[in-house]
Amino acid sequence: MGTRAPVVEGVTPDIVIIGGGFTGLAAALACAEAGLSVQLFEAGKVGCGASGASGGQAIPGLRWGAADLLAEYGEDRARALVETALAARGHFWRLIERHGIDCEASRTGTLTVATNRGAMAHLAAEAKARRRLVAPWDCNVLTRAETGAEVASPVYHGGLLDPSGGHVNPAKLARGLATAAHRAGARIHQDTAVTRIDGTSVVTASGTTTFARHILVATDGAAGALLPELRARLMNVGNFAIETEPVDPALIPNRRAVADTNFVLDYYRLTADNRLRFAGGERYWPGVPADIAGFVRPHMLRVFPQLEDAAIARSWSGQVAITRTRHAAIGRAGNVFHAAGYSGQGVMLAPFVGHLIARAITGDSIMFDRLASLPAGRFPGGPALRTPLQVAGMLWFALRDRL
Ligand SMILES: Cc1cc2nc3c(=O)[nH]c(=O)nc-3n(C[C@H](O)[C@H](O)[C@H](O)COP(=O)(O)OP(=O)(O)OC[C@H]3O[C@@H](n4cnc5c(N)ncnc54)[C@H](O)[C@@H]3O)c2cc1C
């Protein structure tokens, strides 16, 4: 992949991309395919951020469901937003296929499971709103018994099945996108942190300055370090995951990607080699639990008590970048673009946003502008108070899951 291609000074690329996750890599690929010269700087290795750590659940739609979009924005705007989200869905599966990316892509559907009766009513309303807004967004409301046939757990009241989603191995997807971008002509510099943006130039930790016609900040929750105006718009939430040794695949017989309706949600799926990849529990203050497996395992056992003896093969943590409204923070100031804070739903959307940035640069910004028009909001408080206020707010919502 030319992973540590030397930085060539004196060359002005059409675009410098900062960050090698799904957003940055897909933008690099789409820009290179559009004939633009591309340099991408990644502080670590491609996929080492949220993209590689993610659950790999490819969930169609925006973070807001169709029902909420309809209630807040009315029929026309909600329809346009949902159509954009479904364009992201088509783009995602085509991208993997077109570039032959070996990432264990499994189009086996996503299943949202209701943890209480009220949540079930919300899922039914969501299905109704989807049908009203777009014909081809198939989804089925499942009864308690039907949900039990999908997930071998007694805890759910029902579910909403979207057969058009699925899951991927996210680390493999990131590496595959990087390879495709490199083949298309993008220069990818790993282990190269950017410390500063100066107007139209980007400065790396080693002091190299690269001038660029366009800049994309695709560093997710770290974007505020380069673009101070994003500091109050993004917050990182610690999220924790485990993977078991192989289990009986009858646990999720149709291999859906499953997520529950709680604010602090459990989400899980089977890997290609039948391990259960399960995430549960969040932390809003800095730091990682000393024993991540011990932190997540009780969440898994609440759902699947039959896994009492299942061995945990590995555990890890990641930072989910969220915004106050949960709409992604997407925008541009002149020729400097940014996209971050997909609020836990970026696997399908982030590659599409990367693609839309290439389109915006080459003259078609309709869908980019549509997503950029959604307000990310600002977290309250100045630099000193912001974190305690955020923590208090999040804990309140987390508590409501248990009431
Ligand atoms: C644990 C976890 C589980 C998740 N599960 C799901 C899921 O199942 N489904 C879903 O839809 N979404 C999920 N998400 C969210 C999703 O992973 C993200 O929205 C998406 O991957 C964001 O991609 P990105 O490219 O914008 O950011 P990232 O993948 O975080 O990429 C940003 C990159 O920028 C680099 N970087 C940062 N600062 C600099 C700098 N100064 N210079 C150079 N490089 C820099 C970082 O090293 C990083 O590689 C999850 C997130 C986490 C953390």
Image (cartoon, rainbow, N blue to C red):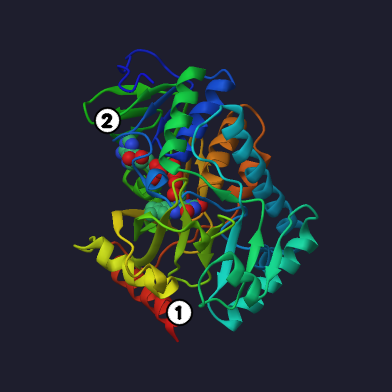
Q: Where residue 40 sits: x, y (%)?
A: 40, 27
Examine the rendering and report whether any part of residue 166 can be seen. Answer: yes
Q: Earlier in the sequence, mark 2 or mark 1?
A: 2
Mark 1, other Cα within 10 Å: few <14 / some 14–19 / many ≥20: some
Q: Where residue 265 sits: x, y (%)?
A: 45, 68
Q: Quadrant of the C terminus?
A: bottom left
In the image, 194 versus 82, the foreground residue is 82
Q: Assess mark 1: CB under 8 A from ligand 1?
A: no
Splitting the image into 4 quarters, where does residue 288 fall?
A: bottom left
Distance CA(mark 2)–CA(mark 1): 40 Å
Total count of labels:
2
Q: Where residue 305 sits: x, y (%)?
A: 40, 74
In the rendered view, would you say 103 is above or below 107? above
Query: Residue extending furthest bottom?
Result: 403
Mark 2, other Cα within 10 Å: few <14 / some 14–19 / many ≥20: some
In the rendered view, would you say 176 is above or below 62? above
Q: Residue at x 45, y 79 (%)?
A: 401
**Do tag 2 and tag 1 residues touch (Cβ < 8 Å)?**
no
In the rendered view, would you say 85 is above or below 20? below
Query: Residue extending furthest left?
Result: 290
Q: Residue at x 57, y 34 (%)?
A: 96
Q: List the residue tagged with mark 1.
A: 401
Given the image, on which type of amino acid does mark 2 rest? Asp
Horizontal relation, residue 171 to residue 80: left or right: left
Given the image, on which type of amino acid does mark 1 rest? Asp
Q: Where residue 183 sits: x, y (%)?
A: 48, 18
Image depth: mark 2 or mark 1 in front: 1
In the rendered view, would you say 290 is above or below 362? below
What is the secondary structure assignment of the residue under circle 2? loop
Marker disc for residue 191: 2
